[in-house]
Image (cartoon, rainbow, N blue to C red):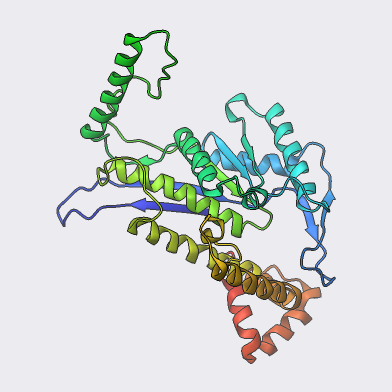
Amino acid sequence: MDTTSFDLPYLGKNSNPSYTSFVQHRGSIPLFWSQDTSAMNPKPPIELNIRDPYFTVSRVHFEQLFERYGSPVIVLNLIKTKESTKRESILGEEFTECINYLNKVIDERKKLLYIRWDMSRAKNNREDDVLEILEEIAEESLSLTGFFHNGPELYTNFVKHKNMFDTQIKEFKKDPSSSTTFEFDEPIKRNHKQYQNGVVRSNCIDCLDRTNTAQYIIGKVAAAHQLYALGLINEPYLAFDTDAIFMLEAMYHDLGDTIALQYGGSELVNTVRTYRNNNNWTSHSRDMIVSIKRYYSNSFVDAERQNAITMFLEKSDSTQNDDINDIIIDADDPFHSNDIALGFLKNA
């Protein structure tokens, strides 16, 4: 699923505005795996159904990403790496093996850039600032993929970069033996459009809570660079406690809730506020309530929601007709109608 952010300043009716866009991708782990939801288990075990030593289907998936977005494809894998009882980590190990294998056999220009980071573990470690780490990942990723800008680089931005480079040169000439590091190549003013090449592909186990937070941070970092390119801010950075970021957070929260309701039957369990160091007991209470709601939905109404999706996508067969007819009969029941409506929205 693609998430695209556009920045288009309004400059009047007769203007020819400059605008920017940035695309990122949310996708599940492209392996053959499943979970047994028949047992009353809030975290059912994960099973690898088919082991393909050549990862054929995974290769097709990533080839499609290269064809659609270009290179590099940056795979941000957020699932757990260490667990007392192996669950997510089983899938993580197989996915890592998959990426390593594909990088040996695919074209050198299409090497997958793989980032495996246990976001849940970092959240529970007080020494780690989850959002700060994600910002670092986002900055590095954006430097590789870029973003689309339909106009040339602003002259004022070019001058800023040139001045920074000149300052570094002067410091180095004063003391050539110093450990001065050059953060910029000598700038050349861009007089043409800038294109995005490649994409960040984020996933956790269900591509909901952790993935949505990661996408929000990547979107936040991209938005700062986009606004800077348009000359709307003086530096390519936006602090968390600003009106623009409050609005962006609200939009990603709505996006995450919509996907979570369609897929999991509840809003997001862990939101951006969950991962901030200053989150409070109100946030913890809210997360707990939503966790219970999602567990109930997955345990008792998930099958009906899946049947509704199947019927909507016209993928039903004769063996499913009885179940589907039952859903249609129950559609007037207010208890079921919301689940059916949400199911119809999925993959629409």
Residue 127 or 318: which is nearer the viewer? Answer: 127
Residue 230 or 27: which is nearer the viewer? Answer: 230
Q: Residue 193: name its quadrant.
A: top left
Counting from the top left corner in percent of width and height, residue 175 is at 36, 9
Residue that appears at 83% across and 64% down: 36
Counting from the top left corner in percent of width and height, residue 324 is at 72, 80
Residue 44 or 11: which is nearer the viewer? Answer: 44
Residue that appears at 61% across and 84% down: 337
Q: Is residue 166 above or below residue 202?
A: above
Name the quarter where the C terminus is drawn: bottom right
Counting from the top left corner in percent of width and height, residue 241 is at 38, 56
Residue that appears at 50% across and 39% down: 136
Residue that appears at 57% across and 38% down: 74
Residue 307 in view of the camera: no
Counting from the top left corner in percent of width and height, residue 230 is at 27, 43
Count of residue discs: 0
In the image: residue 297, left or right of residue 274: right
Q: Residue 333: name its quadrant.
A: bottom right
In the image: residue 247, left or right of residue 300: left
Residue 108 in view of the camera: yes
Q: Is residue 338 above or below residue 37?
A: below
In the image: residue 347, left or right of residue 96: left
In the image: residue 77, left or right of residue 163: right
Name the quarter where the N terminus is drawn: bottom right
